[in-house]
Amino acid sequence: MRLKNFLNAIFVAALLALPTLGAAQTILTVSTPEQSVTYTLEELLALPQTTVVTKNDYVDTAATFQGPRLHAVLKPLNVGPDATLKMVALNDFSSNVPAVDAFDYDVILAVLRDGEPMSVRDKGPIWVIYPMDDHAELRDDSFNGRLVWQLKTIAVE
Amino acid sequence: MTDKNRIIRAVLLIVFFGAVLFGIGVIYKLSDRVDNIQTAEQSDPLWIGSQLQFEVLRLEKELSEVALGLKPPTNVALRFNIAWSRITILQEGKLSDLITSFGIDQTVLSDLEETFQTVEPDIAEFISQERTNDAGRQKAAEILAELEGYDIALRNLLVALAQAKNSTLSEFRTGLLSLSHVIAYLGTTLLILFGIFVSLLLLELRVAKKREREMRTLAEEATSAARMKMNFMSVVSHELRTPLTSLLGGLSLLKARVGDTMKDQTALKLLDVADRNGNRLLTLVNDILDAQALSEGKVSVRRETVDLNDVVTTAVENCQVYAGKLGVSFAVHTPQEPAITLTDSARVTQILNNLISNAAKFTSAGDVVEVRLTQISGRARIEVTDHGIGIPADLQPDIFTPFHQINPGTTGANKSSGLGLSITKQLVDLLGGKVGFTSVEGEGSVFWIELTLHLQSHLAESA
């Protein structure tokens, strides 16, 4: 009886903890051939945040994007500007981005759009955003393919 | 000629302006078209549309695997959300504008979104299910049935997109071709314009050159005419001087011989008149020769140490006889100390002779002409003051130009060449001095020259 009660308590506790666990889901993996680091949404939000207000081809009007700089997740892995980043999205779409962009510009891993988290349905949870409105050269064709949405992993090559 | 030129220029300018506007228009149009094609390529709607089809197919595959019980439904929600995101991408930003501009029927997108909305609660149920039960399989099959028919509709959308894109591209190509023709015309026009401009410039250049040549010839003619005149005068004067000297010599000898014996006073007076006029003629001839020598730069200056006191005294003495005849006397003021300078005493004497005889000539009989030598801060100033007719203010600026004289017609017996002051001015310039005057009409004139003094100490040093 005592044991059953105890098991019940554990079960309830587990049930209560479940949503928390769900919320603490890993949403980004950054990996090099040697090691990899994972991030939850909370961890990404805990990093120093940068806000970028910009327009791009996939939004109707300029929006406010917030998130850590791409550079902030590359730094712990000692990624240099010569590396190439393979950005993989949830739908397995991938795009190769030169790491030097993260050093030259405020490229961010946007997790908030206009202050709200982004759902998968709305290009979330992570959208790589270039400050296109601040730098005319970023409006070039070649940068459009680097705006990877539904980002899942960054593989450093 | 000028009117014609002006018309040609105006027409050219208008044509040029038109061509420039035309060119700007063409370039603007071209860049517009290029922008269009860039947008089409940048966010290739065909590719993004195919991604939608692909994601819907993946969702259907997932669902059918769940319906068959081959897989747990854990991934269904993710696939569903990804597929839905593809719909929103086509409905937002540039892609939406592009599809609208293509004029493609987008109802399939809104229909699909509506269907997604209706099946959303069912999908949500799958998340909580660890394993597939019969109800789940049933549900999956139902959702599949809902999605049926969209495959073909999506394919039609893709075909429409592909056609629209192709037609845009071919339109662009046609436009580019026509624009390249236009640019060729533009280039030809510009070349022609350039040619016209160059020929116009050449024409203008030729006219300017011709004009310049004419001007130069005119100037050369003018200077050579002046030189010829001067040469002629000088030759004539030179030829005149020799017989004139003989004449004057003969006259004075004749006067000496008959002066005492001849009782006929009239004859003696005639001799005097001949002598006086001969001397005037000689002065005139000498002036002309001096002026010619000065204008050709043939006058040399022989500098030596001179006491200007002596020069002034000599000059006054030279003019004494002449002035005596006019009933004019001199008052000479010189400082006690010597005024030493390094100059050509003969030239200075000539200058002073000119000024003093002028003063004597233009002052009234019985008057006293003052000659004053002063020293002011390292310079000697010699002033010759008369109380004669003076120089009218309007004639003063021209006083030092050659052949210039006050009232040449009315000065009568005092007529001269009008070269004196011009020669004086040139000589003073040659000696590095200054010459000037102040004059009031009817009251008299003060003519002055200034020469730099050579101080005693300098002399000692150089000695």
Image: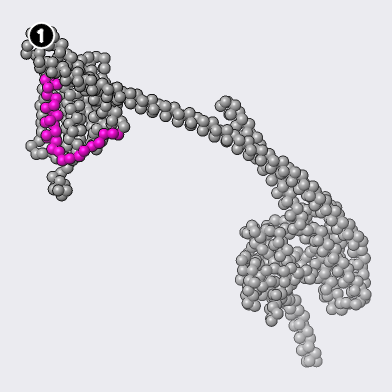
Most foreground residue, B122 or B247: B247
Quadrant of residue B275 within the rendered picture: top left
Residue B378, image quadrant: top left
Q: Is residue B47 left or right of residue B431?
A: right
Residue A101 on image: x %, y %: 65, 67
Amino acid type at circle 1 is Gln
Tell me the chief SS of the magenta region.
helix
Residue A145 percent across, percent down from the top left: 73, 63
- Image quarter where the N terminus of chain B lies is top right
Q: Which residues are magenta?
A: B297-324
Decide: is B56 above or below B403: below
Q: Left or right? Give the position of B345 relative to B178.
A: left
Residue B316 forms part of the magenta stretch: yes
Which of B277/A92 is in front?
B277
The one nearer the camera, B171 or B348, is: B348
Q: Is residue A17 above or below residue B434?
A: below
Q: Is residue B417 visible?
A: no
Residue A75 place in picture, x, y as percent: 62, 75
Front in this rendered view, residue B302 or B361:
B302
Q: Residue furthest bottom?
A: A2
Expressed as whole percent of the image width and height from the top left, the position of residue B295 reads 30, 31
Q: Is residue B32 magenta?
A: no
What is the count of numbered marks?
Answer: 1
Q: Which residue is at a point 28% across and 34% down the rendered structure image? A: B298
Q: Residue at x 24, y 14 (%)?
A: B410
**Mark 1 burial class by Cα count in 10 Å: few <14, some 14-19, many 20+:** few
Q: Quadrant of residue B217?
A: top left
The residue beneath circle 1 is B265
